[in-house]
Image (tube, rainbow, N blue to C red):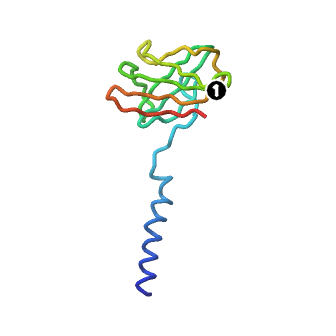
Amino acid sequence: MTRRRIILGAAALAIAVPWTLGAAVLPARAHDAKGPNGGRVTDAGKYHVELVGKGTRLDVFVSDANDAPLPATGFKALAILVIEGKSQRIPLQPEGGDRLTGTAPAPLPSTPKGVVQLTAPDGTVAQARFN
């Protein structure tokens, strides 16, 4: 074998092995899965965010990577959702210890689409996308 073939073969392995193992090595992502409160769950950085809308009330529940619920105290959030064809900003505040709550200007669709921007107690910011 020539030196060039050895180098090209090694480079191909360096690219192929991590790529093929990626599905087995990476943790499963929550993406628009059904949550314990009846809403859709997706990732936001190291957190999972569940979006639950009923009427004009919007609730967001936050859990850790192991799906353990986290207290809402110290979290801040802003939901930017499409409601009746328009982008609406809904500030969310901690309520009841386990959720962030806000009020939409109009009734929410059954599966709201948009983004929840989450600010953790340590100041880190993450986004949860709901499509």
Q: Quadrant of residue 45?
A: top left
The residue located at (49%, 16%) in the rendering is 101
Who is closer to the viewer here, 104 or 2?
104
Q: Quadrant of the C terminus?
A: top right
The x and y percentages for residue 80 are 54, 26
Who is closer to the viewer here, 37 or 130?
130
The residue located at (58%, 16%) in the rendering is 104
Q: Quadrant of the N terminus?
A: bottom left
Q: Quadrant of residue 41?
A: top right
Q: How many marks?
A: 1
Say above or below: 44 vs 76.
Answer: below
Who is closer to the viewer here, 65 or 75?
75
The residue located at (48%, 23%) in the rendering is 78
Q: Mark 1 falls on what kind of element?
A: loop
Q: Which residue extends farthest front?
A: 86
Who is closer to the viewer here, 25 or 105?
105
Say above or below: 120 vs 54.
Answer: below
Q: Which residue extends farthest left?
A: 122
Is the residue marked by circle 1 packed among few (<14), some (14-19), or many (20+) residues within 10 Å? few
The x and y percentages for residue 28 are 49, 43
The residue located at (49%, 36%) in the rendering is 43
User: In the picture provided, is 25 more to the left or to the right than 85?
Assistant: left
Q: Which residue extends farthest bottom?
A: 1
Q: Amino acid at mark 1?
A: Thr
Say above or below: 15 vs 130.
Answer: below
Q: Quadrant of residue 124?
A: top left
Circle 1 residue: 111
The x and y percentages for residue 6 are 42, 80
